[in-house]
């Protein structure tokens, strides 16, 4: 929610930290997401009451499952936690002694298979559950035979980063699911940002993958939220080893450090509800109008080339749909995109923008209403002073 200026100053002064205008996009290091007033109101309301957490986890899980059309679901402290705990569920199953022993996985199925071309930043979160990652295939790619033969009696799951589906040299999700099924191995899909159009979430949930996780930071939920959905028996295993009943139950479960607040759970559910019902065309239109405003304000500047663009979730620059401004210093100018980014960052308020190759990229997905004018004015000031 947008704070009032006086209020913001007090908080930032008290904490000794500067607010930033985020023109980079959804990055955890910049705070991730912004909660809508309606989501915030729901979180605020539950903050005023206590609830039984296992009950809230069950009922919110039902709500999440029904929205994406999964058998079952469970809120988590983000997609990274969903990977660790979901893999833990595949490893430990419904055995309480196993929940307690993790991350010591001796005697359990403790290998997670991943295609060589699928190695990515978050596969480390699977290892946190005490498993070893085993690569299928090599630099040349992964064949069906390679995936098949990498699985053994020790394989707990196949980890599949959904955003890499279709990457050259890798097997498609449906092929992977088919091969894993013949080995009776569950497939875990990290679909952290595969939420648009919302129908995509439903199609992933019903793809035949056994577990699918999403991050709430990408759909307007809490930066520390997400959920795991999929097969009922795996979600039940996950529920068994999560953070509840650590004090009151029989087992010192593995999931205790991945604790959720009740208002985070509400944020995860309410934001998904909003995301499913949102007018996404209007959302994209608002990005476009912010970009157009900045371009228009800078129309008198002759030292840079300006164009609208699309900064993708996997950090590529394309043309459409529009969610960013691309600014390139022309040949013969004495400043670089990096120089401008530094001046933006050093100013007050600090503006965080991206530099990609020789371009300054101003991504507006996370630019709050009105901040585009601040960005435009600052760019104008910086560019005029460099003439
Ligand atoms: C952000 C991200 C995650 C981690 O999600 P959190 O909700 O921040 O824990 C996992 N996988 C991918 C692909 C992501 O982009």
Image (tube, helix red, strand yellow):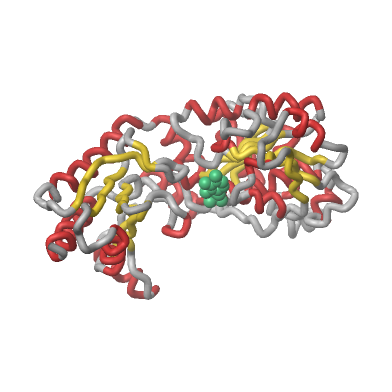
Quadrant housing residue 18:
bottom left
Q: Could you tell me residue 172's position as x and y percent?
A: 63, 28
- Residue at point 19%, 48% (across, down): 294
In the displayed image of the protein, which residue is found farthest to the left? 300
Q: Is residue 60 visible?
A: no
Q: Could you tell me residue 145's position as x and y percent?
A: 77, 29
Q: Could you tell me residue 64's position as x and y percent?
A: 56, 35
Quadrant housing residue 167:
top right
Q: Could you tell me residue 100's position as x and y percent?
A: 81, 55
Q: Is residue 311 visible?
A: yes
Left or right: 136 with respect to 24?
right
- Residue at point 86%, 51% (across, down): 97
Count up the numbered dots: 0
Left or right: 227 with respect to 137?
left
| 75 vs 358, nearest the viewer | 358
Q: Is residue 136 above or below residue 8?
A: above
Left or right: 232 with respect to 53?
right
């Amino acid at each position: 929610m947008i704070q009032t200026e006086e209020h913001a100053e007090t908080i930032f002064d008290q904490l000794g930290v500067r607010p930033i205008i985020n023109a980079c996009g959804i990055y955890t290091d910049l705070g991730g997401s912004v909660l809508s007033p309606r989501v915030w109101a729901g979180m605020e309301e539950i903050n005023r009451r206590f609830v039984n957490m296992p009950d809230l986890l069950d009922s919110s899980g039902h709500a999440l499952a029904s929205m994406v059309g999964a058998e079952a679901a469970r809120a988590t402290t983000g997609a990274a936690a969903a990977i660790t705990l979901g893999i833990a569920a595949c490893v430990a199953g419904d055995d309480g002694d196993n929940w307690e022993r993790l991350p010591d996985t001796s005697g359990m199925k403790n290998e997670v298979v991943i295609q060589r071309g699928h190695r990515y930043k978050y596969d480390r979160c699977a290892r946190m559950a005490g498993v070893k990652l085993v690569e299928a295939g090599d630099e040349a790619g992964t064949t069906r035979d390679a995936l098949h033969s990498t699985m053994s009696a020790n394989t707990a799951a196949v980890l599949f980063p959904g955003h890499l589906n279709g990457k050259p040299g890798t097997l498609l999700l449906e092929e992977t699911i088919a091969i894993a099924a013949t080995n009776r191995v569950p497939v875990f899909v990290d679909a952290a940002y595969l939420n648009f159009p919302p129908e995509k979430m439903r199609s992933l949930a019903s793809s035949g993958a056994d577990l699918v996780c999403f991050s709430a930071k990408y759909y307007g939920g809490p930066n520390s939220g997400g959920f795991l959905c999929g097969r009922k028996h795996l979600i039940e295993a996950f529920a068994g080893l999560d953070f509840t009943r650590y004090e009151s139950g029989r087992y010192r479960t593995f999931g205790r450090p991945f604790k959720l607040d009740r208002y985070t759970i509400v944020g995860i559910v309410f934001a998904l509800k909003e995301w499913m019902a949102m007018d996404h065309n209007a959302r994209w239109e608002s990005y476009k109008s912010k970009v157009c405003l900045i371009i228009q304000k800078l129309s008198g500047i002759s030292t840079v080339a300006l164009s609208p663009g699309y900064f993708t979730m996997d950090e590529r620059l394309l043309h459409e749909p529009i969610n960013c401004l691309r600014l390139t210093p022309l040949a013969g100018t004495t400043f670089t995109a990096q120089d401008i980014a530094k001046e933006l960052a050093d100013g007050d308020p600090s503006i965080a923008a991206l530099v990609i190759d020789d371009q300054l990229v101003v991504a507006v997905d996370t630019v709050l209403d009105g901040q585009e004018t601040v960005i435009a004015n600052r760019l104008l000031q910086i560019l005029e002073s460099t003439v």
